[in-house]
Image (tube, rainbow, N blue to C red):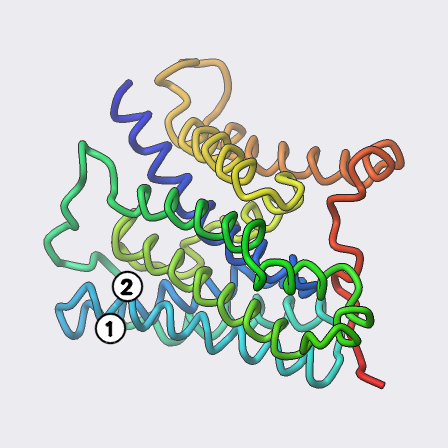
Amino acid sequence: MWEFFIRSLDASTIFTIAALGELFGQRSGILNVGIEGVMLFGATLGFITAKTTGSYLLGFLVGIAVGGLIGLLHGIFSITLGGDQVISGMGIWILGFGLTTYIGSPYTGPLGMERIPTILGLSPFFFVAIALTVIIWFILSRTSLGLSIRSVGENPEVAEVSGISVAKTRYLCVVGGGMLMGFAGAIYSLDYNPVWNYNFLLGRGFIALALVFFSMWNPFILLGGSILFGTLWQLSLNPQLFLPGLMSRYIWRTVPFAITLGALLLMSTKWFRTKWGAATPEALGQPYVKD
């Protein structure tokens, strides 16, 4: 039972850090549906770096840097060129799925390095995820930078008139968010499950995307939702621990995605938009062209 609890919290770490990256970008008005692709790049290149150099540090740094670079590319298309953010994000996901399969294929198999030490049985990155949650909440809620980010996400025209650079603020958020997504991918491949295989994230990036909407853009609700989905994910892998013989484990593996779909359907209803719509950044997904 304790091992199940530990693994659930470890799984929630991936969701939390990736979703925090998306939340940070969305608060500035930039939507990136390609989280899975960014995570795949961070996970694969971080894994290859660590395996070839024997350094965990370099592996994580590469994962973070690659995530930031992809965030920058998404920013160029979405901010500078004013392109459709959904199309750009889907392109990142498709590119990530295809290119990482090609690049990582020669490295298929275990990492082959000594595992990262745990803290009371927990991955140290779980505590990093909690710290990042507090930091991002503080930045968004208690700093002038956070006020600028929220202003740009709500009404970029007014923010620009007030002296805030919409483009610079959005670039900061989309690059910073990409770095967190790449970091989450590297954590998966170097700590949570250090065995490379193609498409090994199995949709975790899409669950992270749903968690941002589920949390109503609140970092603390996001953390709680991540723990819930981490538990559901672990239950889908080991249902026999609690409900032996009830359903096939393959059916259980659909549960996290079914709940994700249900949550998104609920959020699309008129009742939800009326009651909670104020939490949505008004300019989310909308390109801004400076007059």
The tag on residue 137 is none
What numbered label is drawn on residue 49? 1
> Could you tell me which residue is drawn at 55 percent across and 72 percent down?
172
Which residue is painted at 74% across and 54% down in the image?
281
Between 53 and 291, the one lying in front of the other is 291
Q: In x, y percent, where is residue 233?
A: 45, 34
Q: Is residue 142 left or right of residue 157?
A: left
Depth check: 74 or 97 in front? 74
Q: What SS does tag 1 mark?
A: helix
Q: Quadrant of residue 240?
A: top left
Quadrant of the snapshot with the C terminus? bottom right
Amino acid under label 1?
Thr
Camera-side residue of 19 and 108: 19
Q: Quadrant of the N terminus?
A: top left
Residue 210, image x and y in percent?
62, 45
Which residue is nearer to you in this view: 232 or 105? Answer: 232
Q: Where's residue 88, x and y in %?
A: 66, 73
